[in-house]
């Protein structure tokens, strides 16, 4: 687990915290929404498929950015990789819905966890810094 976190930090310094935010959003979507639906299993599977897709998108974006910076990739290649990422998400959602493997609405809400986590990241960084400072004060 520690090696994975180190690798993610090598890829992008903010990626581990972004993934934590996506998973936290998934738990929030799961806990709040499951009470209001009849088909709890499809709601839950839709939520966690969405979380998985959001994690895939975050890691894929980090890889694309890294390859663009290191390899001086062309704009057309970057556009293709970005469009391919969204096509994969749409295909997974269509397959999930077609075969009744999950509900697409909570999946979409869970995918939006990528955006929520990205916007909430400055606040999370401040919280973690404040927490570290409080721990240091307590030790002294």
Image (tube, rainbow, N blue to C red):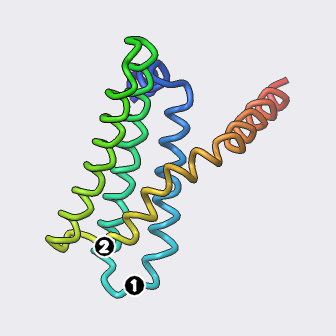
Q: Badge 2: how crowded within 10 Å, few (<14), some, or many (20+)?
A: many
Callout 1–callout 2 Cβ contact below 8 Å: yes
Q: Is residue 125 left or right of residue 78?
A: right
Task: Pick out the residue farthest to the front.
Answer: 76
* Residue at the image point whose x is 37% and y is 20% from the top: 74
Query: Foreground: 10 or 131?
Result: 10
What label sits on residue 103 in the rendered view? 2
Q: Closer to the camera: disc 1 or disc 2?
A: 2
Residue 28 horizontal/vertical position (percent): 52, 64
The residue indicated by pointer 1 is: 37
Is residue 115 positioned above or below 7 on the image? below
Is residue 92 positioned above or below 31 on the image? above
* Residue at the image point whose x is 55% and y is 37% from the top: 17
Residue 115 horizontal/vertical position (percent): 54, 51
Q: Is residue 80 left or right of residue 120?
A: left
Is residue 6 positioned above or below 57 on the image? above
């Amino acid at each position: 687990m520690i090696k994975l976190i180190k690798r993610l930090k090598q890829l992008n310094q903010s990626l581990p915290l972004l993934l934590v935010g996506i998973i936290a959003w998934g738990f929030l979507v799961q806990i709040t929404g499951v009470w209001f639906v009849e088909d709890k299993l499809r709601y839950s599977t839709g939520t966690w498929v969405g979380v998985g897709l959001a994690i895939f998108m975050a890691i894929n974006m980090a890889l694309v950015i890294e390859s663009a910076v290191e390899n001086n990739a062309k704009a057309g290649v970057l556009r293709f990789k970005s469009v391919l990422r969204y096509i994969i998400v749409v295909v997974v959602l269509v397959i999930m819905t077609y075969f009744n493997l999950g509900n697409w609405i909570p999946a979409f809400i869970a995918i939006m966890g990528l955006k929520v986590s990205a916007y909430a990241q400055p606040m999370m960084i401040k919280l973690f810094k404040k927490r570290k400072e409080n721990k240091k004060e307590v030790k002294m």
